[in-house]
Image (cartoon, rainbow, N blue to C red):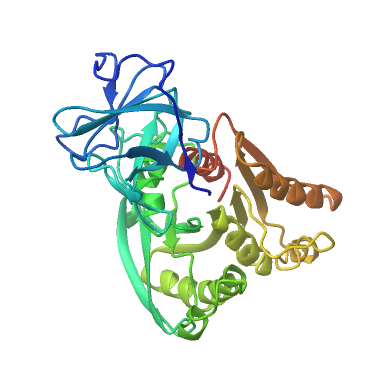
Amino acid sequence: MQNLKIITSILGFCSITMFSQNYKTSVTVLEGKDFPKINAENQTQFKVYFPDAKSVVLEGGDGMQNLKSVTAKDKEGFWNVSTSPMDIGFHYYWFNVDGKRTNDPNTNLYFGYGQPTSGIEIPSGEDFFFEKNVKHGKIVNDSFNSEITKGKRNFKVYLPPNYRTKKFPVLYLYHGTGEDITGWEKQGYIRNILDNLFAEKKAKEMIVVMDYGVALNPEQEKMPDNYPRTVISTKNLDKIVVQELIPYIEKKYKTDGKKAIAGLSRGSYQAMLIGANHPELFSAIGSFSPVIYEGTEDQPFKELPISKLLKSKQKPFFFIGIGEKEDARFFEYNEAIINYLNQNKYSYSQYKSPQTYHEWLTWRRCLYQFAQKIFR
């Protein structure tokens, strides 16, 4: 995901000093705050207090590439920003305040781009990830000490509403680059998605382990950035999942032995590598916004052992999803995987998220689709 400065314009907007009653406060604001606000056309208004600033520029990540905005400072020291219509979905953003990246003091912070970052939800009209009046599962924090990385590993576990009544299958789920184990809980609304699916009898109840996507030992942490850190980390994850995490989960929680694995962006690569290496363990593999690391033109899967799926007696269900507006490189990864599966007559399920980028609405929708197809 690239940081993209939003193009500013003083044309085509109504006066930002007049805030329309048609604007509604974003769901991502802190309690007691009014801004940012969004109207029915997805135009957005921000109001931030930087009284000593000489320049305030709205910036953001995927989904905000073509956004135009107009900014003005009032007599009280508030900077008022009004934008052109934004694309639906969840978007990270911040302000460039006199050259310094600064979060919006009005919103909740979400861990993205390697640090706490402001976020805004542009409504899509869907409610599958909203909290409803249904039985709720819960998310608990857990950890263990890894011999492979020589340190403590933290993760989160979603337990379904009827957890105490029987044993359940387990989905091992990974986040993306620059994010952490809070992603699926906060930005991903995983509890609401699964609670609602289970209440509607659309998916089989499951436990979900939200593992951390970085696994380097102290020596590997010192490697320069030009080393294939993601590949090395993922190979460590492979060992951790099979040798440490699965045994820990199956000993501590009420599991029935069935397992699936999935992830988004970098996590998709991790899920594919671990799943392909152990098709006898996982009944399903989910690749949300797929990424392939360290491939070459002649060997696109040089560091991704997808060929093992073809040779295995067990053939895990393979799901691949992508946002309709994602960057070309993600569609190239997507096509490389699909072409390979087609050439080798390996069955898969494909999903394309309408009107979304490389962001959390895409991945919520992917999880919603994937969860309905596994453990059947």
Q: Position of residue 156 (x, y in %)?
A: 36, 61
Write the residue at 43% across / 85% down: 150
How many numbered callouts? 0
Q: Is residue 348 visible?
A: yes
Among the 4 quarters of the image, the one containing residue 267: bottom right
Q: 229 above or below 11?
A: below
Among the 4 quarters of the image, the one containing residue 356: top right
Query: Foreground: 200 or 241?
Result: 241
Q: 85 above or below 371?
A: above
Q: Position of residue 357 (x, y in %)?
A: 55, 38
Q: Position of residue 130 (x, y in %)?
A: 35, 34
Q: Position of residue 233 (x, y in %)?
A: 55, 72
Q: Residue furthest front?
A: 54
Q: Is residue 255 left or right of residue 80?
A: right
Among the 4 quarters of the image, the one containing residue 218: bottom left
Q: Is residue 314 left or right of residue 127?
A: right
Query: Foreground: 321 or 260?
Result: 321
Q: Is residue 82 left or right of residue 226?
A: left
Q: 156 above or below 371?
A: below
Query: Foreground: 233 or 157?
Result: 233
Write the residue at 66% across / 62% down: 293
Write the residue at 44% across / 52% down: 206
Q: Is residue 75 left or right of residue 119?
A: left
Q: Is residue 160 visible?
A: no
